[in-house]
Image (cartoon, rainbow, N blue to C red):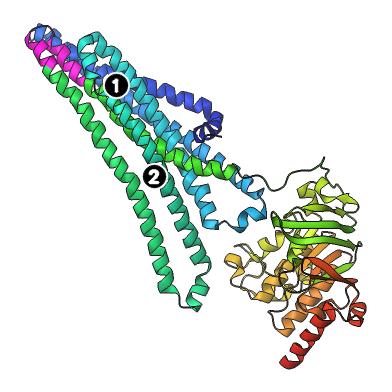
Amino acid sequence: MKPIRLVLSYARKYTLILCFTALSMILLVGVQLLIPWIIRILIASVADLSYSPQTMRLVTQLTLLVLAIYVVRAVMQFLRSYLAHIAGWGVVADVRKYIYDHMQRLSLQFYEDKQTGQLMSRMVNDTDLFEQLIAHAIPEVLVNVITFIGVSIVLFYLNWELTLLSMIPIPFIILAMKIYARYVRPAFRTRQKELGDLNALLNDNLTGIREIKAFTREADEMHRVSVGIDRYRQSLLKALKLMATFQPFVEFTSSLGILIIIYFGGRLAFQKALPVADLVAFFLYLDLFYQPVRNLSNAWEQVQGSLAGADRVADLIKEEPELTAVMQQITLESRAIGAISFENVYFEYELNTPILEHINLEVPAHHVVALVGPTGVGKSTLVSLLPRFYDVSSGCITLDGQDIRTITLDSLRQQISIVLQDVFLFHGTVRENILFGKPDASEAEILAAARVANAHAFINDLPDGYDTFIGERGVKLSGGQKQRLSIARAVLKDAPILILDEATSSVDTETEMLIQQALERLMVGRTTIVIAHRLSTIRNADKIVVLEGKHIVEMGTHQKLISQNGLYRRLYTVQNQINSIHH
């Protein structure tokens, strides 16, 4: 979709408001055209009539008429401005909502090589420019075009020869606008990109401020931010340089028209071929004639800047949604039993670069299956296929015998709870973060979930208990506390399938025991897939699956795998040796 059509498609909703805006602009132009005509009447009256009570009455009437015109003009200016802003910011709000909804449907793969700050810049800074187009540029163009047409009609009525002479600079201005548009839009697009880069850098640095301080990188990061600020300034100045060149050219070219009228209009007046009142009115209207041309140059800048932002928004909207339905999709109306099957699954992020190959795995309902293997063999990727964060490249995954691609994403993911090693908590209270698992949960359910997660005791010790603000990403909590809140969140969701990325390796022994107890309670009655880092924690798993080099190489219970002289036994032996050294 072309950028201008993208913006206008969202403006349709505000057609009525924009029609009232257009009407107020037409009335505004009308009252502005009356004032020079009234001055013409006054000058003609002064020339033709002597001083008398009747002439003073005429002057008074003309003065009151101009006052009334100024009042109407003020009202029309208010309506034009306010109504245009209602439509403009309405379009911005609608576009932002659509972009956010669209971004939620994009795949995780899309986000892997994108910076948060860049995406935020597209959603906030680039869409801001839509308001400029709807509330300023388009109304400016419309009112100036109407003014230009209206003044042209009046000027032709006064003297058609002078009017044609005054139009000599117009083609040069139109040509300049075409040339200007060719260069200024890319310049504005570059400016928006540099602003996005700067936002991304600031977002990264403020998020990672602890690391910056810990590694004493303040000076280095100050330099990077300074470079980003300077790059944005330079890109902005490049666009402003084009603007600074274009505007004086338009001013100078339009001024040539006034010089032409001074020369030819003056000659006609001296030759008595043009009344003085008409000449004065012609000059007053001539200023109104060139004012739209000058204003159009400013509006043209706003149009090009807005379209540059719309270009970047359009690029984002072009991104394909998360996943496409391969067949007719169904909604799971009831709780799943939880039987999972991976049938000859292959997966690759990039074409011809497989991450997983020939994966066949049965996970019976209510069983615990552990995935183990060296770092980078695809354990996390494998479990990410189940909630369809990514789709299989070939093969299929079934839930209770149903291909998961035939199940709607919402109803599929409602059947799955995930507790990750890298816990993400939102800025807000403890209560709000637990409720993320089930927003309509009662207070009793919240407390019960916290108790199951071994979190109730430490939450009560917080300054405001469940209403304590935990800071961005839960910065005010320890790793173990964050982990237990994420478990409470999963308990509250109460999904029949549980994915665990075990996260006890970075906590102390006591906290590890509390988390392990909470996880064991959470796993009861659920189909559970565990990504195991500490092999000692999955000895009681119903099935242990060992991955190496894109494949499943071993499968069985702990005792069975230990009895074999394979990879699992080697990994288990090495971990035991490390643990004995530490103890």
Q: Residue at x 24, y 36 (%)?
A: 248
The one nearer the camera, 248 or 175, is 175
Can you give x and y, in whole percent of width and height, for residue 420 in the image?
72, 67
- In primary-sequence order, the first of circles 1 and 2 is 1
Q: The N terminus appears in which quarter of the rendering?
A: top right
Depth order, front residue of 214/334: 214
The residue located at (27%, 41%) in the rendering is 244
**Nearer the observer, disc 1 or disc 2?**
2
Mark 2 Cα shell of 10 Å, populated few (<14), some (14-19), many (≥20): many
Residue 207 belongs to magenta span: no
Q: Is residue 159 visible?
A: no
**Please, what secondary structure does the residue beneath circle 1 have?**
helix
| Residue 54, horizontal then vertical, whole percent | 14, 8
Is residue 233 rendered to the left or right of residue 517? Answer: left
Report x, y in % for residue 155.
25, 13
- Seen in the picture, residue 269 relative to 168 is either above or below; the reply is above
Label 1 Cα crowd, 10 Å radius (few <14 / some 14-19 / many 20+): many
Amino acid type, label 2: Ala
In the picture, measured across the screen, residue 506 lies left or right of residue 37, that is: right
Give, as a single range, the part of the protein colored magenta. Answer: 264-285
What label does residue 32 carry, if any? 1
Q: Which SS does the magenta portion mostly show?
A: helix
**430 up-or-down from 337: above or below:** below
- The residue at 27%/13% (across/down) is 154
Residue marked by disc 2: 187
Q: Using the rendered view, name the quadrant where residue 515 is placed.
A: bottom right
Amino acid carrying label 1: it is: Gln
Disc count in the image? 2
User: Which residue is pictured at 90% across the width and 56% down the height?
Assistant: 337
**Local SS, label 2:** helix
